Image (spheres, grey):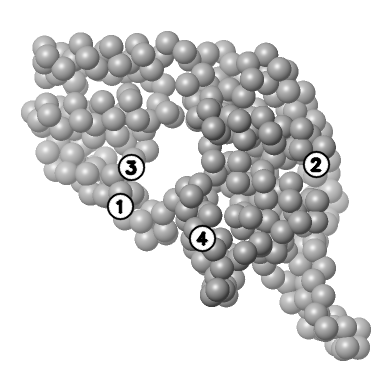
């Protein structure tokens, strides 16, 4: 008989939408592009940015998209420059430094182009609903949330088990989570679930993180609201999937999307304790999943990659079972 003793549970956040190979290609080509741009080789820099974006199926980080537009402009290719700048303004919710585009002299080739007024008009549309003070408030909450959890990751590498340092850090995290929740609940009461059009992606994710890190009662309270927010385009389906899984897990139900993992020790109860102590196996495993054979279809429907990719990150020998 096998028993799993849970030590703690983890919600996987910030899961990349692409594999590690794609990340490596993107980073390599992006670094190459940056160096070429600095050396004045704008055409080659622009092409290198394009190669980086291919690794992410045409997607790009906002600052890289902006630099690609600048490189094409400096290379004298207005069409390609406008292509990247329009995508930046209309398709990238994380970008807010629109004033850079307006005053950037490296884009002077574009200033007298017939498309320039249209680009400026799109910038105005992108900024019109933005609540900058609220966005900054939520971004600060996000930074505090993630900074403390990164420290927790560092202590887990340094100390085994629950050292006094880790216990104290957990106390600090719990206190900060409580303070963050007070702020976020006040924001939701005033604005509803703030979408990316109001607070951009980072601010929007901060609301989700605070709810995700709260107690079950709070999560159940805001779960219906987040479902409505997803339908209205004000929250991300993948974030809702994490919350759905977390609530199900805490209520003793199977998860739906496989976002929750557990870490513990497995041992055979038929073996004498002394042998068990010498043969402890600590391992990551997925919390039980409903209809596991179709989990990757459900993950894909909310923008998550295959579960096998997550298993590789945690060095788990895992394959989705066949029907």
Say few, some or many: other residues with alpha carbon within 10 Å of mark 4 (under 14 / 14 to 19 / 20 or more). Answer: some
In space, the residues marked 1 and 4 are separated at their CA atoms by 22 Å
Mark nearest the camera among 1 and 4 is: 4
Residue placed most toward the observer, 322 or 9: 322
Q: Is residue 188 visible?
A: yes
- Contact, mark 4 vs mark 2 (Cβ under 8 Å): no
Q: Quadrant of residue 160?
A: bottom right
Residue at the image position 53 percent from the left and 37 percent from the top:
236
Can you tell which quarter of the image residue 266 is in?
bottom right
- Number of residue marks: 4
Which secondary structure lies at badge 3? Answer: loop
**Quarter location, residue 113:** top left
* Screen quadrant of the C terminus: bottom right
The residue singled out by tag 2 in the image is 216
Tell me where residue 215 appears, x and y as whole percent.
80, 39
Q: Which residue is labeled 4 in the image?
A: 296
Q: Earlier in the sequence, mark 1 or mark 4?
A: 1
Mark 2 to mark 1: distance in Å?
39 Å
SS class, disc 1: helix
Location of residue 175 in the rendering, given as x and y in whole percent from the top left corner? 81, 33
Left or right, 209 with respect to 195, comes to right
Q: Please name which of the two marks, 4 or 3, marks the residue nearer to the observer.
A: 4
Q: Nearer the viewer, mark 3 or mark 2?
A: 2
Return the mark for residue 137.
none
Farthest left residue? 76
Q: Please name whichever residue, 86 or 249, is drawn nearer the observer in this view of the structure.
A: 249
Q: CA distance from mark 4 to mark 3?
A: 22 Å
Task: Give the residue pinned by disc 1.
Answer: 55
First reached walking from the N terminus: tag 4 or tag 2: 2
Q: Is residue 99 above or below residue 155?
A: above
User: Taking 25 as reference, is 208 above or below it?
Assistant: above
Image point (83%, 44%), residue name: 168
């Amino acid at each position: 008989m096998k028993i799993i003793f849970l030590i703690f549970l983890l919600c996987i956040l910030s899961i990349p939408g692409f594999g590690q190979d794609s990340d490596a290609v993107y980073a390599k080509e992006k670094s190459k592009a940056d160096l070429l741009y600095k050396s004045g080789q704008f055409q080659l820099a622009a092409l290198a940015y394009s190669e980086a974006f291919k690794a992410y199926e045409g997607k790009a980080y906002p600052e890289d998209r902006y630099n690609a537009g600048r490189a094409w402009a400096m290379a004298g290719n207005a069409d390609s420059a406008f292509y990247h700048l329009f995508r930046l303004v209309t398709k990238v919710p994380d970008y807010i430094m629109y004033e850079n585009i307006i005053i950037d002299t490296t884009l002077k080739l574009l200033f007298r182009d017939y498309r320039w007024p249209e680009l400026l008009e799109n910038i105005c549309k992108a900024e019109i609903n933005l609540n900058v003070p609220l966005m900054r408030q939520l971004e600060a909450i996000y930074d505090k949330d993630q900074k403390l959890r990164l420290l927790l990751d560092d202590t887990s590498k340094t100390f085994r088990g629950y050292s006094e340092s880790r216990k104290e850090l957990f106390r600090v995290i719990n206190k900060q989570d409580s303070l963050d929740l007070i702020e976020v609940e006040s924001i939701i009461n005033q604005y509803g679930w703030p979408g990316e059009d109001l607070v951009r992606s980072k601010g929007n994710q901060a609301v989700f993180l605070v709810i995700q890190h709260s107690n079950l009662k709070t999560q159940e309270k805001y779960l219906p609201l987040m479902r409505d927010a997803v339908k209205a385009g004000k929250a991300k389906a993948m974030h809702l999937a994490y919350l759905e899984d977390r609530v199900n897990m805490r209520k003793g139900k199977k998860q739906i999307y496989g976002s929750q993992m557990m870490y513990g020790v497995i041992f055979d109860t038929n073996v004498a304790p002394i042998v068990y102590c010498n043969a402890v196996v600590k391992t990551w495993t997925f919390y039980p999943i409903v209809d596991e054979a179709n989990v990757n279809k459900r993950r894909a429907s909310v923008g998550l990659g295959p579960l096998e990719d997550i298993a590789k990150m945690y060095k788990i020998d895992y394959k989705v079972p066949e029907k």
